[in-house]
Each structure stands twice: as structure tokens, then as C-alpha cells.
Image (cartoon, grey):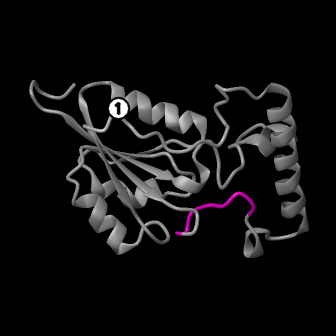
Amino acid sequence: MPPAGRFLRVGVVLDEGDMRGWQAAALSDVERTGVCNVTVFTRGSGDGACTRHPVGNRFRNLRHAVRHWLYHAYEWADRRRFGGADDALARVSIPSGDGGATHRVHLRGDWPSEAQVAAITAEDLDVLLCLAPDVPADRLAGCARAGAWSLHGGGCGEARFFWEMYDGDLVA
């Protein structure tokens, strides 16, 4: 807890084009604590963020491309069978927040450009939460007093460790 009368300054990094239900819930939970001033940093899908169906050099080989599309087929089937209003992996829009304690900053380009680092550092944050899959928290750690913490469910639309579990790997 911050000292009495002082709010914790929290930055949250999100990709607008790939916002998931669990990320929206995490952001809402942080905003509702009553002890945080939240700054949300976002990028649109055309600003270097992951897109729903990446193309080009994203597919290193045919096997990778097949696995990518198989995962999306699995995800679609899962949503059809088990999806609901509270689906943690469903794509959602970024919540509007409570209006008073949340400040929004839209960033452009790939993570982290010098301009983005400067914009994030200028907010004088206590901690930075990186909830987007392709945000290098280690390279943004110097932007906040307590560093940058990364929490995401995978990269560019794939669940983390999905294929490791599918393949039966002992270590992921």
C-alpha cells in the first residue's frame, strides 16, 4: 500500500487490436482498488501490434504455419462450444474506466521505440504492467520505479505453452 494520501502510479500496456477478456478484467480490477492512478498505454493494430492473422515472415516454415492455423481452429471450436459472456480469452474492446483516475496514452510503432520509452517515463510511474504479448518488459523496466512486470497469455494470438502441453514436453 502506498503511504496515506498518496496514490500508486500504475502504467498498463495493452494492444488495442488483441485485447482479451482477462486483460480487461485485470485493468478494471486495478482501477477499482481505489489506491491507484492508472495510465493506459495502447497501440492500434496498425501501429506495430499483433494482428489476428499475421502473414509474411511470421511463418518461418510450413510446419509453423500449419500449427498456427490449427491453433486458431482449436480456439474457434472452443469458443463455439464453451464460449460465453465471461470468456477470458474472448476479444473485447478496452474498457472506458471510471473516467477520473485513468489517463490514456496512444503509442505508435514497434516496442519499444525511443519516443515510446520517453512517453512512458514522462508519466513518472511506480510500476508498469505489460499485458500485451509482444511488449519486452525487460527493455521497459527502467520506465517505472519498481520496474515493468509482464503478464500475458501467449504471443500474437496463441496461448502460452499450448503446443508444449500438446506435444507432451516435460519442460516448457
Residue 16 drawn at (x, y percent):
53, 54
Residue sitting at x 25%, y 59%: 121
Instruction: Inspect the image, locate mark 1, and give the three-letter code of the amino acid beneath it.
Output: Glu
Q: Which residue corresponds to mark 1? A: 31
Residue sitting at x 40%, y 64%: 107
Q: Report crowding for label 1: few under 14, some 14 to 19, many 20 or more residues within 10 A (C-alpha).
A: many
- Name the element at disc 1: helix
Instruction: Tell me, yes or no, whether the highlighted magenta stretch contains residue 142.
Output: no
Q: In which quarter of the image is residue 77?
A: top right
Q: Which is nearer the eye, 108 or 168?
A: 108
Q: Which is nearer the eye, 139 or 118?
A: 118
State the quadrant of the N terminus: top left
Instruction: Tell me, yes or no, whether the highlighted magenta stretch contains residue 49.
Output: yes
Q: How many labels does the image show?
A: 1
- The magenta segment is 47-53
Q: Quadrant of residue 49?
A: bottom right
